[in-house]
Amino acid sequence: MAIIALLHGPNLNLLGQREPHIYGSATLDDYVAATAAAAAAQGHTVEAFQTNHEGQLVDAIHAARGRVAAIIINPGAFTHYAWAIHDALAAFDGPVIEVHISNPNAREPWRHTSVVAPVATGSIMGLGMHGYELAVDAVARKLASA
């Protein structure tokens, strides 16, 4: 059994309230519960953390080193400019799956660049809650083949 860190960046605490036409009606708790259920089905556990502060997310990534097997991260707006998050993820030894509820490439041009993608094992975008379940499956497969 492995621990998977599930990390969320800014404004994701407002899921279910913020722009439901883009993000739907599911709350952050719903996303965490679905991810934890998918992980449990694979024999893994999830530790979830959300923050609106870049440094706290960097600290959470640092705290995951040597303690958790993988990271699933939705960095929110930090995706597009937070090089400190990029660098922290680059120092993590396990699989990193970047996940986005909506498809940033189908939205405003400033959302088209991810500074996280170059250090992620893979990226899943635009599939809502199903993307989180796919991220767990990707992590489980990577851990099983390691």
Image (cartoon, helix red, strand yellow):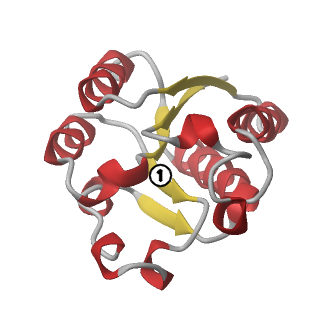
For image coordinates 74% across by 55% down, the residue present is 129
Q: Judging from the image, what secondary structure is the residue with disc 1 in?
A: strand
- Residue 75 lies, in percent from the top left, at 41, 46
129 or 23: which is nearer to us? 23
Q: Is residue 8 left or right of residue 64?
A: right
Is 125 above or below relative to 99? below
- Label 1, on which residue? 97
40 or 26: which is nearer to us? 26
21 or 118: which is nearer to us? 21
For image coordinates 39% across by 57% down, the residue present is 121
Q: Quadrant of residue 48?
A: top right
Is 80 above or below relative to 72? below
Q: Is residue 95 left or right of residue 86?
A: right
- Residue 115 lies, in percent from the top left, at 23, 59
- Residue 1 lies, in percent from the top left, at 67, 23
* Residue count near mark 1 (Cα–Cα under 10 Å), binned few <14, some 14–19, many ≥20: many
- Residue 57 lies, in percent from the top left, at 34, 28
Q: Is residue 28 left or right of residue 98?
A: right
